Amino acid sequence: MPQLEANGLTCLSLFSGGGGLDLGFERAGFDHIASFELLDVCGETLRANRPDWDVRSGENDGDVRRARFTQFRGVDVVHGGPPCQPFSIAGKQAGAEDPRNMWGEFVRCVLQTRPRAFIAENVPGLLDKKFESFVQEVIIDPLASNYTIFKFRLAAHDFGVPQARRRVFFVGFRAARDASRFREPAPTHADDAGVFGPLLPRNTARKSLGLPEIGYDVVSPTLRSGFTGPRNTTGVINSKAALKVWNELQIWPNGVQPTHAMALAYPPENGHFRLSVADCALLQGFPQQWKFSGAVYQALGQIGNSVCPPVGFAVAREVAAALGAYQ
Ligand SMILES: C[S@@+](CC[C@H](N)C(=O)[O-])C[C@H]1O[C@@H](n2cnc3c(N)ncnc32)[C@H](O)[C@@H]1O
């Protein structure tokens, strides 16, 4: 994921979490205006990595429900990933009935700031038939008279991330000319790289972690967020099927340790490789320098909740291109 030169565009981040999407936008050359995030620990991560960013976190300053967005009118792009639990197949899929549903706030921000473009990200479950009317009534209808809206899915492993992770994106443009220039991000990596042009081979889990060859290597299963599932969990297993893949990879996805040294000091009984927080961040596509604040479960929460930065970068770059930034 390269660092592109400043593209002259500003962006406002909602639901910033541990900064996956924010980082992708920064790498695409955007100027970060502010981040809103409910959890203080996420705010600490953002401030520690980017002391010069305007980070508003916690119940008083970070809750989007209390934010007056009109102060940001004139910002070029608004982006955010509203909490996905209301739509995730890992949850009850209560959708609009779930008090964590914040889509209305994202829409309010777009209506009040009137950016040239917006980007919203979520779990693929949001495109299930059962949420069709929710998507139409809560997201599309309030914005469609001012924005041309694109809806598409991306897979992180198509963008060099050594993990199976699919997400859905909504991208809207205010000007028809910008919308006509927009292209969905094209994959940069594939299984059959070379057959279809200049694609790179997929990055796989063991190779990315620097582990020796065992005759089997694939992208890792989706990492579960430490903010979901059992309280304060330090495991990243998403499903029984995922456990099978972790086993075949000979990687131990429970009891993730704060550091490499501690992970090496406590090998599991079966001799598999125990993960550290830094390993999980790497499997999510974060650069090594990006550090997560908080206890292990909080770091895993921020990692597993995040947009893989290379995916965020790919979307941000296409949006900037559509806005005429690189001409
Ligand atoms: C899916 S995560 C976003 C991850 C982020 N886009 C990234 O790439 O790292 C959703 C975030 O929304 C935050 N959140 C939930 N309710 C909020 C609210 N009312 N105001 C601000 N942030 C909120 C959660 O704490 C969580 O960090």
Image (spheres, helix red, strand yellow):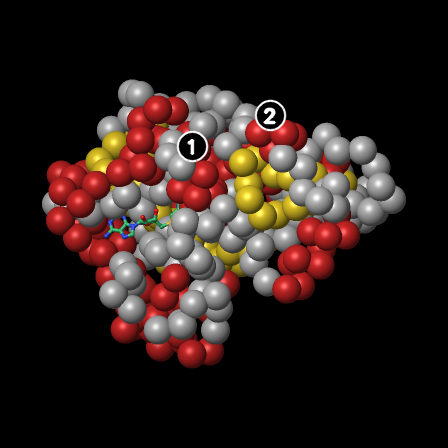
Image x and y of residue 262, in percent: 57, 29
Q: Report whether 57 appears left or right of 216.
A: left
Disc 1 from disc 2: Cα separation: 17 Å
Q: Secondary structure at mark 1?
A: loop
Quarter of the image where one finds residue 150? bottom left
Asked which quadrant contains residue 108, the reply is bottom left
The structure residue drawn at horizontal position 26% and vertical position 38%, both measured from the top left corner, is: 40
On screen, residue 65 versus residue 155, left or right, reads left
Q: Position of residue 29 (x, y in %)?
A: 43, 28
The relative height of residue 264 versus residue 224 in the rendered view (above or below) is above
Query: As displayed, is residue 31 above or below residue 227?
Result: above
Q: Secondary structure at mark 2?
A: helix
Query: Which residue was labeled with disc 2?
Result: 261
Nearest-to-viewer mark from 1 and 2: 2
For image coordinates 67% across by 37% down, the residue present is 267
Residue sitting at x 25%, y 65%: 99
Q: Residues within 10 Å of mark 2 (few under 14, many from 20)?
A: few
Task: Indicate the amino acid at tag 2.
Answer: Ala
Position of residue 252 relative to residue 289, above or below, is below
